[in-house]
Image (cartoon, helix red, strand yellow):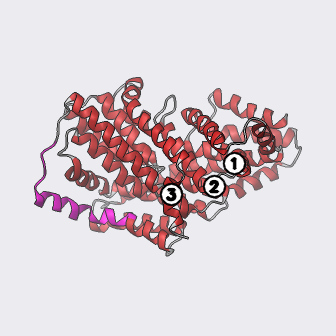
């Protein structure tokens, strides 16, 4: 009964407009004081314990890497390279946006950062070339959803910390699903572009293509160093995140020479601090809330209830996917992972679901939540940047959302798409 009341208190606080982190902390405090009757010092201790983790240190470094990448000129060079690769195909600018998002997702690990970086360059350019504002917003908002699934990924770090799953294996496991989704987006965008006769860009000369490759070389080298270092065991994930942040700062300041003032550096650091602070507060409060749910034995209650319904892990995964598709409409990805995984993870272990497979399925599922209203963080941001109504941008994103759902079904019911690459590490 107490577990249900705890859940209800959080939902009520959230739906009246209180931020999720505050709702989690406030509902936890009420039950600690009035139900469990423990000192508030326990609350402070659990809040600190929730973020006292070495892997969590990767989050501020990856966020800083994304901010430094944008400020240091890496984004514009990635777009130019993507343009040389696919811009000459029908609907070239749409394809450039997707390819650029795929590349930049391998640098920052944050969907919102990717959307902001690519959207600021590509959305105005697409509108000038005759693409509708709603399509430009829907496309970029959807493609930015690649951020949490293509490694590195902040959401994967959060899942790994909560469950004890290897973050390195999660990173490697997200590569194939990310590629499947990216290629699917490109196919959908091409079909739409052909039907609407969207323009293609001029095919670059060999010299022009080579120039774009040379200019983007240092940006493309970063994921090779970082992910390659993780794969062969040179770096831990946290060390790799630190290397990526230093690398982006160095490349922006000394190679591309666009991070050339204290003001630009200050702005990048300030944006990073604000993002990291919100994530850390959310993690701390959600860890406290999750601990209380465990104290009230909600995982055991849920396991008993589910086992009375079905004994099939495939049915269980289907139900979890439905739950997360709905939750992703209202709750930010990291918050959803922190809130639901401590409850569902013990249940999935009872059904024999591989934790690596589960992690990638959940993270990918929440990627789709980035483009589904009413929250839809990347879709909302992209629509705002395109100056298009959110509902029109959402309608334009439906083909891409369908591609995402089909990809989700593939990785859910063909686990080898997730587990094959990580198995090569063993």
Label 1 vs 2, first from the N-terminus? 1
Indicate the secondary structure of the residue bearing disc 3: helix
163 is higher (above) or lower (below) than 392: below
For disc 3, the neighbor class at 10 Å (few under 14, some 14 to 19, many from 20) is many
Magenta span includes 73: no
Location of the N terminus (image quadrant)? top right
Label 1, label 2: how far apart the Cα atoms are: 8 Å
Q: What's the CA distance linking mark 2 and mark 3?
A: 11 Å
Regarding residue 73, the answer to whether it shows in the image is yes
Q: What predominant SS class does the magenta segment belong to? A: helix
Magenta region, residue range: 201-223
- Residue 46 in picture, x, y percent from top left: 75, 54
Q: What SS does tag 2 mark?
A: helix
Tally the numbered discs: 3
Vertical position of residue 217 compared to residue 267: above or below: below
**Along the polypeptide, which appears first: circle 1 or circle 3?**
3
Q: Which residue is mark 2?
A: 355
Q: Is 207 covered by the magenta stretch?
A: yes
Q: Quadrant of the C terminus?
A: bottom right
Residue found at x 17% / y 45%: 88
The residue identified by callout 3 is 173
Residue 348: mark: 1
Q: Mark 1–mark 2 contact, CB under 8 Å?
A: yes
Is 125 located above or below residue 75 in the figure?
A: above
Q: Does residue 266 appear in this view?
A: no
Front one among 164 and 406: 406
At x 30% / y 37%, what residue is drawn? 189
Q: How much space separates mark 1 and mark 3, taking CA atoms? A: 18 Å
Write down the quadrant of residue 127 in the picture: top left
């Amino acid at each position: 009964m107490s577990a249900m009341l705890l859940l209800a208190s959080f939902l009520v606080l959230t739906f009246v407009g209180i931020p999720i982190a505050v709702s989690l902390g406030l509902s936890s405090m009420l039950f600690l004081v009035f139900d469990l009757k423990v000192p508030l010092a326990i609350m402070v201790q659990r809040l600190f314990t929730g973020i006292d983790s070495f892997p969590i240190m990767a989050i501020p470094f990856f966020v800083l890497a994304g901010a430094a990448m944008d400020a240091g000129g890496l984004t514009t060079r990635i777009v130019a390279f993507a343009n040389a690769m696919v811009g000459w195909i029908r609907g070239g600018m749409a394809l450039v946006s997707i390819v650029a998002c795929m590349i930049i997702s391998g640098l920052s690990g944050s969907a919102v950062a990717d959307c902001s970086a690519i959207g600021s360059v590509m959305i105005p350019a697409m509108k000038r070339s005759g693409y509708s504002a709603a399509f430009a917003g829907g496309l970029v908002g959807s493609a930015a959803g690649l951020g949490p699934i293509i490694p590195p990924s902040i959401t994967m770090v959060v899942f790994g910390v909560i469950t004890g799953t290897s973050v390195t294996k999660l990173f490697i496991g997200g590569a194939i699903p990310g590629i499947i989704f990216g290629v699917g987006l490109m196919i959908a965008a091409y079909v739409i572009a052909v039907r609407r006769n969207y323009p293609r860009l001029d095919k670059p000369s060999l010299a022009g293509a080579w120039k774009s490759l040379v200019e983007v070389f240092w940006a493309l080298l970063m994921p090779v160093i970082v992910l390659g270092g993780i794969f062969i065991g040179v770096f831990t994930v946290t060390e790799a995140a630190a290397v990526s942040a230093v690398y982006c700062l160095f490349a922006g300041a000394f190679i591309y020479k666009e991070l050339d003032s204290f003001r630009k550096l200050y702005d990048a650091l300030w944006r990073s601090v604000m993002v990291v602070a919100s994530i850390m507060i959310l993690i701390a409060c959600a860890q406290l809330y999750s601990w209380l749910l465990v104290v009230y034995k909600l995982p055991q209650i849920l396991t008993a209830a589910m086992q009375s319904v079905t004994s099939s892990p495939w049915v269980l995964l289907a139900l979890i996917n439905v739950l997360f598709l709905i939750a992703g409409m209202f709750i930010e990805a990291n918050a959803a992972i922190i809130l639901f995984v401590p409850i569902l993870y013990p249940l999935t272990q009872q059904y024999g679901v591989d934790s690596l497979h589960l992690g990638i399925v959940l993270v990918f599922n929440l990627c789709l939540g980035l483009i589904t209203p009413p929250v839809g963080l990347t879709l909302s941001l992209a629509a705002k940047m395109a100056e298009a109504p959110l509902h029109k941008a959402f309608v334009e994103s439906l083909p891409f959302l369908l591609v995402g759902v089909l990809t989700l079904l593939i990785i859910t019911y063909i686990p080898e798409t997730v587990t094959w690459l990580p198995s090569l590490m063993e």
